[in-house]
Image (tube, helix red, strand yellow):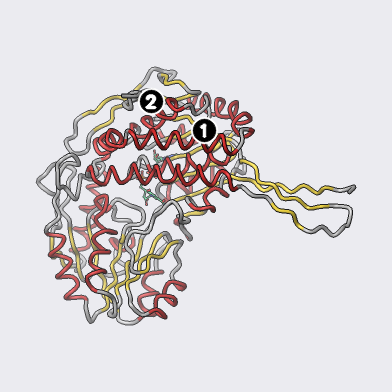
Amino acid sequence: MGVSILQTAAFINGEFSESETGASFPVFNPANGKEITRVADCSARDAERAIDAAAAAFKGWAHETADVRAAVLKKWRSAILEREEDLAALLSTEMGKPMAEALGEIRYGASYVEWFAEEARRVYGEVIPNASPSARTIVLKQPVGVCAAITPWNFPNAMLMRKAAAALAAGCTMVAKPAEDTPLSALAVAALAKEVGVPEGVFNVVPTSKPAGVGEVLATHPKVRKISFTGSTGVGRLLLKQASATVKKASMELGGNAPFIVFKDADFDAAIDGVMASKYRNGGQTCVCANRIFVHDSIVAEFSKKLAERVKNLRVGAGNETGVDIGPLINRTAIEKVERLVDNAVKDGAKCIVGGSRHEAGELFFQPTVLTDVLNQSEIAQSEIFGPVATIIPFSTEDEAIQYANETIYGLAAYIYTRDLGRAWRVGEALEYGMVGVNEGVISSAAAPFGGVKQSGMGREGSKYGLDDYLEIKYLCMGGL
Ligand code: NAD
């Protein structure tokens, strides 16, 4: 059986406790609008309490051996996988994604815990030759200290796990603030952390309906040494500004506007599969989602037709219904934004060849949609759509495709489909993005450095680089030898 994963209180210093004011806020199921439960609404004071707990726990946790930290993380991972069905059901209920995708997310999140448990043992230093024969230059890596994590609703488990696992593996402690739409998945993994013996104060979760207040405490508190944020570019900018007052380290995983370029020499069917996976996963609510699909003008008509046929067959419904591909959008603001972008694009001359409006499944459901004849400078092409809407933009030359792709403030993920090896290298190098999928529509993995350039952020998560983001470099000059 194990502990209950449905927790509604804040998790501070190893205990679930109400917020100091006793306030709570509702969490809704986006598929039917029903309240699931109420969750402790943490105040700035609760955030300070959590930071104090994390600061008190830091010394002990940092001094544990890497083996001890790895063992704790492995137990956490096992507990998560033992309860994967329950965690996936909870995630799907609060966020809306289909059960199969929710289960995939739990496993994906757990893969970061496994990865960083292993990487914890590989925090190597260095000895650099010194100019003096009687001195040695030694480089150490040490945990940064108390870290704050602010995470989004679109991957409520995985976005948290890839921060928490890296932080804890490095010897840092953490205060996490989950998104107000999806706090339950974070509290659920906190319950499992407690069950497997993550020491008090090492991992804390402070849900709140008022992210600006708690966020400001996390970004400005002198005891917090690093802030790791995943979310929109606008909030990222604000947090960077706030964090500058105490010169914190910062990792920012921000918005994206991924180009998906299909050259005329591409494997046509593989490219269609790639768009389906990259665009329609999570209802189009992923930061690495294909946002603009550039197709060579010699094949664009056929490509659009084939894509529309596939999209027509996508099943829309609540995440817990069998065979569903597309769940609801997260909230009213989200669906209104998608609707407005599509309406404006059509007014501006785009053609809607499938979908185009809300879906009868419920208030927050949008029809899987394909728009053709979209302009790269249009509002829809320059915004993160965050919905099940593919926009197709024709291009004629390789240089034009590169130019279009780079015409955005974002630089997270990009995709190219081509069978020409030279072109794959040329275009891959010319794209101003942190990640490029070549003949691959799904590129995230615990072993790979995930992150963006330009206004998509800074820092990397996953891989050996993800651990570096939670480590400081210290240099000892050993003299008198
Ligand atoms: P958001 O920026 O509105 O919210 C993200 C988090 O920030 C939430 O926890 C929210 O409560 C918090 N927040 C909101 N206002 C805040 C404030 N004033 N101070 C402190 N915290 C605040 O973004 P969202 O709508 O939840 O998520 C979607 C965005 O996240 C998209 O832009 C998407 O691309 C991005 N995202 C990026 C990645 C990545 O790895 N680069 C991954 C997933 C999502």
The one of 481 and 476 positioned closer to us in this rendering: 481
Q: Relative to 343, does residue 348 appear above or below in the rendering?
A: below
Q: Relative to 133, does residue 24 appear above or below in the rendering?
A: above
Q: How many marks?
A: 2
Ligand 1 is in which quadrant of the figure?
top left
The one of 9 and 123 positioned closer to us in this rendering: 123
Residue drawn 24% across and 79% down? 297
Q: Are marks 2 and 1 in contact (CB under 8 Å)?
A: no
Give x and y (percent) for residue 60.
62, 28
The answer to whether mark 2 is within 8 Å of ligand 1 is no
Label 2 environment density (alpha carbons within 10 Å; few <14, some 14–19, many ≥20): many
Give x and y (percent) for residue 392.
24, 68
Residue matched to label 2: 41
Element type at marker 1?
helix
Q: Quadrant of the N terminus?
A: top left
Residue 217 badge: 1
Q: Relative to 18, does residue 274 appear above or below in the rendering?
A: below
Amino acid beneath label 1: Val
